[in-house]
Image: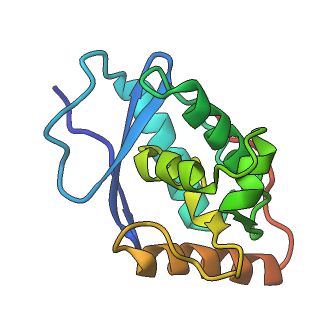
């Protein structure tokens, strides 16, 4: 098998893994040991190019098609809602729960985001606590903070390319 595509980023090495249906995971860290049995290297490379452009500031939106076949309907609804949060803005877990029609399910939203394997295509970093504190992301708050600060800084520099770069 040819080498897997990856992107070196300020939050670590990212390995986009796609199938013919879309992006199934973005593995962080060393090379992934478990690959989808139906891995599509062409789509994985397209996702890698889009991620490079997003991290270099050329794209504000990662419109990459997702393969969420292993996600529950609730998780899919949460991911779709989170993808609608504009670049450089945030929403609280409770607001996302309202967006998906489940008021009071803020903790369930947090659990869905903790299971999300396709961040930052699903920009989980844009979901914060109701008081504005960043929280979430397990022990990797520095990456979440970096992503939020990057988006805020990019917006202050002026308009970005808003095209959706599908894979």
Residue at the extreme front: 104
Visible in this render: residue 90? yes
Give the color scheme: rainbow, by chain, secondary structure or one colour.
rainbow
The residue shown at (71%, 49%) is 97
Counting from the top left corner in percent of width and height, residue 100 is at 75, 40
Q: How many numbered marks appear? A: 0
Q: Quadrant of the N terminus?
A: top left
- Horizontally, is 14 left or right of 102 in the view? left
The residue shown at (72%, 80%) is 152
As drawn, 1 above or below 60: above
Image quadrant in which you'd find residue 13: bottom left
Counting from the top left corner in percent of width and height, residue 124 is at 57, 57
- Horizontally, is 62 left or right of 139 in the view? right
The residue shown at (55%, 30%) is 66
The residue shown at (35%, 27%) is 41
Counting from the top left corner in percent of width and height, residue 3 is at 20, 38
Visible in this render: residue 167? no
As drawn, 166 above or below 8: above
Q: Quadrant of the C terminus?
A: top right
Counting from the top left corner in percent of width and height, residue 7 is at 38, 56
Residue 120 or residue 166, whichever sits in front = 120
Residue at the extreme right: 159
Residue 165 or residue 35, whichever sits in front = 35
Residue 22 or residue 73, whichever sits in front = 73
């Amino acid at each position: 098998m040819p080498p897997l595509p990856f992107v070196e980023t300020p939050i670590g090495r990212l390995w986009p893994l796609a199938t013919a249906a879309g992006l199934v995971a973005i593995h962080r860290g060393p090379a992934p040991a478990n690959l989808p049995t139906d891995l599509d290297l062409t789509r994985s490379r397209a996702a890698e190019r889009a991620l490079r452009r997003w991290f270099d500031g050329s794209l504000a939106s990662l419109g990459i098609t997702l393969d969420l076949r292993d996600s529950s309907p609730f998780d899919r609804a949460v991911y779709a809602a989170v993808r609608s949060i504009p670049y450089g803005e945030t929403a609280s877990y409770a607001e996302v729960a309202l967006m998906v029609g489940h008021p009071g399910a803020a903790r369930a939203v947090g659990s869905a985001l903790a299971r999300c394997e396709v961040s930052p295509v699903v920009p989980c970093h844009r979901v914060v606590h109701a008081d504005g504190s960043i929280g979430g992301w397990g022990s990797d708050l520095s990456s979440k903070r970096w992503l939020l600060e990057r988006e805020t800084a990019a917006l202050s520099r002026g308009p970005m390319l808003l095209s959706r770069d599908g894979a």
